[in-house]
Image: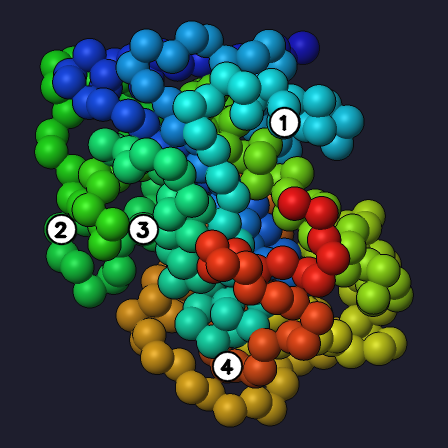
Amino acid sequence: MTTRRTPTLRYEREVWRSGAGLLAAIDEVGRGALAGPVSVGVVLLAPDTKPAPFGVADSKLLTPQARQRLVPRIRRWALDCAVGHASAAEIDRIGIIAALRLAAERAVSQLSTTPDWVLLDGNHNYLIPREQPGLFEVDDRAGFAAGAPPEPERWRCQVPVRTLIKGDLRCSSVAAASVLAKTERDALLVELSRDYPQYGFDENKAYSSPRHLAALAEHGPCAVHRCSWNLPGVGRLDLDDTDPDGADRAAADDLNDQTWPDGDEPPAPTETRSFPADWVMGDDGQMTAAGAAR
């Protein structure tokens, strides 16, 4: 029987010992979904942070009930935390990579204190636009490197970024961020399911479940589907292409060849449509379904 690895603050403390200050740990959910927003969670931690609350793990390994119980514990544990979103319309308009960056910037902008560095889950630093050369990514598959890590690049918020493969499985800071993002996005999809019950968003959270695919084949996409994608059973929609960020589209094409952490492999976004009427933007730049609980 395989024992599930419990994430810790070991990696974070390795970096803190090299002199790094406040950490913003970031993880995303919803990248491989066919509809709804992509959501990015951020948790702010200090070098003297105590171990994470018991039970914190990658959100995909937890039941919905376990995730909900962890949310207030994570909020009490962290110095600060937030979740940012980019809507399906924004994904259609600027591409999934730029949308991830937008959601992350919205999340970080809500923090009460500016972090000194960012720990980003994965092997692709989507926080830095493609046109900025020399992207630095910490590939730590072989273990923790000895000595101080090299100086990383900075993203447009002027925060150093370090990426870590399987960070949500190894680092409790990233795992906590994933729990916050997952619970908030799931709540949005439950709200959207009331307006579009035929797709079963409350159950599948807009991923490609049999019910979702059958509804797409029968009804076609709704206002919150990512209509620039080759939706299963629908094909490419004839929409105007107003892509302002070709570099991010190319990055999305590259990433679409990989297996997404959420288990789905979305086609590359290539076209655009208008913003759904039932979504609103708050003063903090977050996109939410009207009436959704925050």
In the depicted structure, whether residue 279 falls above or below residue 78: below
For disc 2, the marked residue is 134
Q: What residue is at 35 percent from the left and 41 percent from the top?
A: 123
113 vs 238, left or right, is left
Q: Which element carries disc 4, helix, strand or loop? A: loop
14 vs 122, left or right, is left
C-alpha span from label 3 to label 1: 25 Å
Q: Which element carries disc 2, helix, strand or loop? A: loop
Q: Hey, what amino acid is under mark 2?
A: Gly
- Residue 139 place in picture, x, y as percent: 27, 32
* Sequence-wise first label, 3 or 4: 3
Q: What residue is at 31 percent from the left and 27 percent from the top?
A: 23
Q: Nearer the viewer, residue 4 or 290?
A: 290
Q: Residues within 10 Å of mark 4 (few under 14, many from 20)?
A: many
Q: Which quadrant would the N terminus be assigned to in this image?
A: top right
C-alpha span from label 2 to label 3: 13 Å
Q: Is residue 61 visible?
A: no
C-alpha span from label 3 to label 4: 22 Å
Mark nearer the viewer, 4 or 1: 1
State the colouring used for the structure image: rainbow
Q: How crowded is mark 2: few (under 14 residues within 10 Å), some or many (20 or more)?
A: few
- Classify residue 117 by image quadrant: top left
For disc 1, the marked residue is 71
128 vs 216, left or right, is left
* Sequence-wise first label, 2 or 3: 3
For disc 3, the marked residue is 127
C-alpha span from label 1 to label 2: 36 Å
For disc 4, the marked residue is 271
- Residue 71 place in picture, x, y as percent: 63, 27
